Image (cartoon, grey):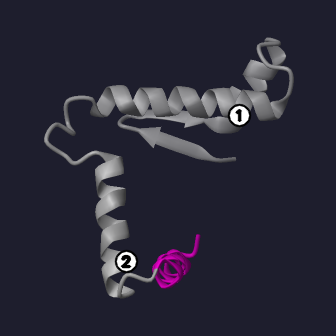
Amino acid sequence: MQTITMSEEKIDIQAEIDAAMKKGQYSDRKDAIAALQKQLVDYQKGALKDALKGAPSVPAMEEAVWKEFLAKAGGDEDKAVQLYLDELKKLNL
């Protein structure tokens, strides 16, 4: 059983999925999981709404990271992609 703690609130993920399925809200577990995941993301966005003012946007960060890899690769896009993939491997994704 997987439990996530948000501040003082604990959520039993499997129980939430099971409850949504029993209520007939979703056609299958995959749809229920996707919908509950979206709800969690929306909750997180709301919780962080004012906390991220002044932080760079994700596209701006991605562009900066790409430019860094491209510079390291001497302008060769294939090498830059390989550097990016090497970094992802380090994260065990």
**Which circle's residue, 2 or 1, is located before the other in the chain?**
1
Q: Residues within 10 Å of mark 2 (few under 14, many from 20)?
A: some
Is label 2 in a helix, a strand or a loop? Answer: helix
Q: Residues within 10 Å of mark 1 (few under 14, many from 20)?
A: some
Q: Is residue 4 above or below residue 32?
A: below
Query: Which residue is most to the left?
Result: 54
Q: Which one is in front, 11 or 90? A: 90
> Residue 86: x, y in percent?
52, 83
Image quarter of residue 44: top left
Q: Mark 2 vs mark 1: give the one in front.
A: 2
Q: Which residue is mark 2?
A: 70
Q: In 3D space, how far apart are the residues under numbered discs 2 and 1 (Cα atoms)?
A: 37 Å
Q: Amino acid at mark 2?
A: Leu
Is label 1 in a helix, a strand or a loop? Answer: helix
Q: Main secondary structure of the magenta part?
A: helix
Q: Is residue 39 left or right of residue 2?
A: left
Q: Is residue 48 left or right of residue 89?
A: left
Q: Amino acid at mark 1?
A: Ile
Which residues fall within the magenta stretch?
Answer: 77-93
